[in-house]
Image (cartoon, rainbow, N blue to C red):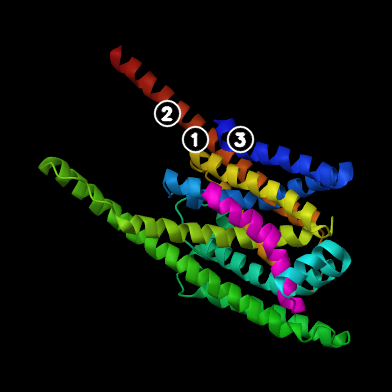
Amino acid sequence: MLLKTFGWSFAVTALGLVAAVFYGGWEAFGIVAILSVLEISLSFDNAVVNAGILKKMNAFWQKIFLTVGVLIAVFGMRLVFPVVIVAVTAKLNPIDAVNLALTDKNQYQQLVTDAHPAIAAFGGMFLLMIFLDFIFEDRDIQWLRWIERPLAKLGKVDMLSVCIALIVLLITSFTFATHAHQHGGAHADKAQTVLISGIAGLITYMVVGGLSGYFEDKLEEEEEREHEEEERAEREGKPKSAVLLAGQAAFFMFLYLEVLDASFSFDGVIGAFAITNDIVLMALGLGIGAMYVRSLTVYLVRQGTLDDYVYLEHGAHYAIGALAVILMVTIQYQINEVVTGLVGVILIAWSFWSSVRRNRALAATEGKAEGSDEKTEVSSGV
């Protein structure tokens, strides 16, 4: 089971590390290994959240997520995306941007750093909306009840998450503009870029998430109708009919997963420049990490880990909220990537331990109940 799920990840790791050695020797090998660990640690919360969505999709779309999705994640976000943002911000064509990445790594890094405010605003707003929609929803199972219970009541107010997200964006862009003017106005023109990018992230979330939710609801309705039709067809001896809507629903859920993965990748891509300016090593290291995140997502689904450890999803969403805040803060201030990674790991580890304690408490309660029932039976027999 483990080898089947992580087999491709192991193979890509071996190929990537061998390619790194041939490309730049053992130093390149070490850089790629560090980048892989960085990507996995920063994106573990991504795997937990992805698993919550992927478990609603059938085996076919899970395979699509592991094949086509990996191509999008590795080549799209980890290789093409850094080149695209440089091309857009520096007003270069993609070919010149690639040449710049390969021939003048320091200049390439500077251009990506200049584009960071727009990237952070887009990704931060997208992730913030995920966290707010989660925390404002009334749930049967609550982890940090003293926070989640009152917020669930506030969540009954329509569009509250959107209002809060826009307030955060306005404060961030205003603070960024004020800071820029006080320090010579070098980045004053980027305050508008931050605002526009943040709004674009909000719109992206609402469009993709809205379509995904709509088709997910339709899928549930259609599955019930399909089940009834299949039973009727079996009774009447007629062939079963395919339902196109299931494909549409799965497609939009897949699209949502890809946008979600892209948003999670922002911090990894930007953080990678703190380790290397080499676009080839960056693609190898982050690509290996992305493969493990994909495999881990499928593993969580097939093992039913989210059902056994009920607070994991909560911890992952709190990590998303923390990452969203960190991304917005990094528009103006620099935060070490180690801090970013540790925040997510600590929150998820905490939620895992809370789930273990909950399971032990439930098992102890059930054991006491069974013991009480046995004593009652013995007493009745006597």
Q: Nearer the viewer, mark 1 or mark 3?
A: 3
**38 on left or right of 378:** right
Task: Give whichever of 237, 189 is nearer the camera.
Answer: 237
Distance of mark 1 from mark 3, alpha carbons? Answer: 35 Å
Q: How many marks?
A: 3
Which residue is the site of mark 1? Answer: 362
For the magenta stretch, what is the residue range?
Answer: 65-92
**Chief secondary structure of the magenta span?**
helix
Q: Amino acid at mark 2?
A: Ala
**133 on left or right of 236:** right
Q: Within 10 Å of the Cα at label 1, are there few (<14), some (14-19), or many (20+) other Cα atoms?
A: few
- Residue 369's disc number: 2
- Residue 7's disc number: 3
Which residue is found at the position 48% from the left and 71% from the top? 207
Taking 119 as reference, is 265 above or below it?
A: above
Question: Helix or strand or loop: what does disc 2 sit on?
Answer: helix
Of labels 2 and 1, earlier in sequence is 1
Residue 346 forms part of the magenta stretch: no
**186 on left or right of 197:** right
Distance of mark 2 from mark 1, alpha carbons? Answer: 10 Å
Q: Position of residue 232 (x, y in %)?
A: 15, 46
Q: Are marks 1 and 3 in contact (CB under 8 Å)?
A: no
Q: Position of residue 108 (x, y in %)?
A: 82, 68
Which quarter of the image is occupied by the C terminus?
Answer: top left
Which residue is found at the position 63% from the left and 60% from the top? 76
- Which image quadrant is residue 158 in? bottom left
**232 on left or right of 14:** left
Task: Give whichever of 369, 115 is nearer the camera.
Answer: 115
- Name, please, the residue furthest toward the top: 382
